[in-house]
Image: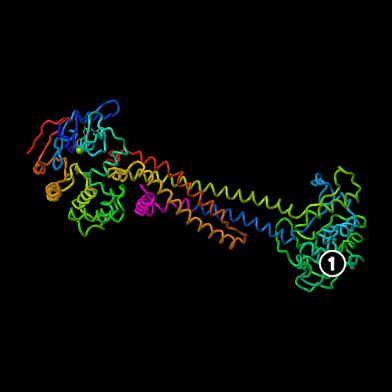
Amino acid sequence: MDNNDLIRIENLTRVYKVGETQVRALSGISYRVQQGDLLAIMGPSGSGKSTLMNIIGCLDKPTEGKYYLEGEEVSTLDKNKLARIRNKKIGFVFQTFNLLSRTTALENTELPLLYSNIPRKKTRDLAYKALSVVGLEGRELHRTNQLSGGEQQRVAIARALVNSPSLLLADEPTGNLDTKTGAEIMDIFKNLNQEKNITIILVTHDPDVSKIAHKKIYLRDGKIIKEERE
Amino acid sequence: MNIIRTIRISLRALSRNKMRSFLTALGIIIGVGAVISMISIGQGAKRAVEERFDSMGTNLLFVRPGSRSFRGRHGGGGTYQNLTPDDAKAIEEKADAVRYISPNVSTRAQIIYGNKNWNTSIQGVGAKYPEIRNWEIEEGIFFDEIIVKSGQKVCVLGSEVNENLFEGADPIGQIIRIKKIPFRVIGVLKSRGEAGGWFNRDDMIAIPYTTAQRRLIGRTDRINSIDVSAISMARSMEAVEQIEEILRIRHKIAPGAEDDFNVRNMSEIAEGAAESTKILTILLGGIASVSLLVGGIGIMNIMLVSVTERIREIGIRMSVGAREKDILLQFLAEAIVLSFLGGIIGIGMGVLSSNLISHFAGWQTLVSIDSIALAFLFSGSVGVFFGFYPARKASKLDPIEALRYE
Ligand SMILES: Nc1ncnc2c1ncn2[C@@H]1O[C@H](COP(=O)(O)OP(=O)(O)OP(=O)(O)O)[C@@H](O)[C@H]1O
Ligand SMILES: [Mg+2]
């Protein structure tokens, strides 16, 4: 087994308890992701894509199985250590943007840096830089409710990038956008992957979107039913 | 996580919703304002009482018949009379810590001047009465030792009596009738300005005690009480002891037996009055503290609502790496910042309203540093205490559920 894997998951299982019944959202997933990969996770609704992303993004813990990120086992870490990992190594982009309302693009982008030990003066510079990467120069001081959906998602991407994470996760990032805007957002991911060699994992329903991916996995009922590589 | 950063995050979050922040702080503003102004009323009353006693002369001592333990029953010198003019003379001559004495014989009587009638208190006193009581003469003169010794029928009017009988006309040299006996007015006392209250000290007439004995009471061997002024405040206890010694010998009281008189000094009486204003302060402060408490509960209430309203925000913060501790500190800091700001504004409001109270109601008020410090400290701890529960609740949220919350 290659120890240079960025991500290695083994037999990952996640069971939700809802009252008396148990929902097996993931059952026995094993997979590896290398540095620089662009992976698309596909599958029908309810197949467990978001559940898997949340575990990879250290927002959730598996019921069983192991998850190694950069060689470190994170499936056993406590809440605080997971928060540190989210802060340092992971950038997350959501379908619903999840920006703070009544707050400027700049302040939203700065947010992860407020929870790290980066000096304040430097957080400004980093946030400006991240916003220019996603093409929002000049809009830094606009409030999020003054921005279009596509622009809001760009702010969310800038926020995900600002900490220079090893891993960028996006759960249906174009799900709330029209086709044209969605394509623009996908271009940003493509460029980040190709030009900056950032590892990206995307969840999507869109077959066009998955064309830019080097690797694809298909989930159904919490299992990988198909893997594709270029 | 450093404190300055936490405070900055809190301030930013608070400024995102200024109206809600203001309403939250309002409870504290009102609470602190109420505490400060209520305590200022209590302290002002205390100061007013102290000043009143000061104006009466802090060196003042009273000698009255009746033992200390029977003071309640025999006090006031009404029926049980065992002090004599010679007792007074002995004190004046022998007690060297005593400056002045004034034998006192008091009664009430009907006064007639022209067609006007007035019922008032008649104080038969010695020549040094104004000095002992720290009382100035407005017009004319007070009777001197010679007049007292010869028991002349002269009187000095309290300002209220003067107003009622003479209505602005010059009273000096006029003849008034006390119990139908003619007295010549030789002076008027300055007003002590205590309209209302339990005892209006301007509603009285002073006459020589000798005259009162002979003309009004009809016996010359007894007096009601003796007013004494000590040489100085420092020597007033000494004066009390000297008087007690002199009177015990004169009244032939065996060692160990109880005195048949009592000597009290002014500071003792002033202390009693100060004690009651202290109770007033505690009472007012206590009532106001309740409103501060209500303000604190208001903070908790709004912080709880705010946590629910901001679940998504909390989820977002957690998703980018905020730890439980960061969220806890943020919400706690918000509560503390609110209650401190509320406290500062409340102190301003309290000082302002106590000034308004003294201006419009005419009560003396006193804002002490102590009450400001107390209110400030209290408002801060209200923030910590009532902010903790909502803050903890926020920090315990699960990031995924929080993000999904609509
Ligand atoms: N918090 C939860 N409690 C209980 N069951 C849950 C919870 N979250 C997800 N599930 C269940 O787990 C399964 C997988 O859900 P998940 O959100 O991962 O699906 P998904 O592939 O992302 O679907 P979609 O494409 O609609 O987003 C579903 O059956 C869902 O009902
Ligand atoms: Mg999903």
**Picture residue at 82% right of the left edge, 59% below the top:** B98
The quadrant the N terminus of chain A occupies is top left
| Coordinates of residue B404 in the picture (x, y in percent) | 27, 40
What is the quadrant of residue B109 in the picture?
A: bottom right
Residue A153 appears at what percent x and percent y?
A: 20, 49
Residue B145 at what x, y percent from top left? Answer: 88, 66
Q: Please tell me whether mark 1 sits on a helix, a strand or a loop.
A: strand
Q: Residues within 10 Å of mark 1 (few under 14, many from 20)?
A: many
Magenta: main secondary structure: helix
Direction from residue B28 to residue B247 in the image, left or right: right
Left or right for B385, reference B356:
left
Image quadrant of ligand 1? top left
Q: x, y (%) of residue A90?
A: 23, 43
**Viewer-nearest residue: A111 or B53:** A111
Q: Please name the residue that numbered disc 1 is placed on.
A: B155
Q: How is the image coloured?
A: rainbow
Relative to B126, residue A211 above or below: above
Residue extending farthest top: A20
Q: Quadrant of the C terminus of chain A?
A: top left
In the figure, is residue A162 to the left or right of B146?
Answer: left
The magenta segment is: B1-29
Q: Nearer the viewer, residue A118 or B73?
A: A118
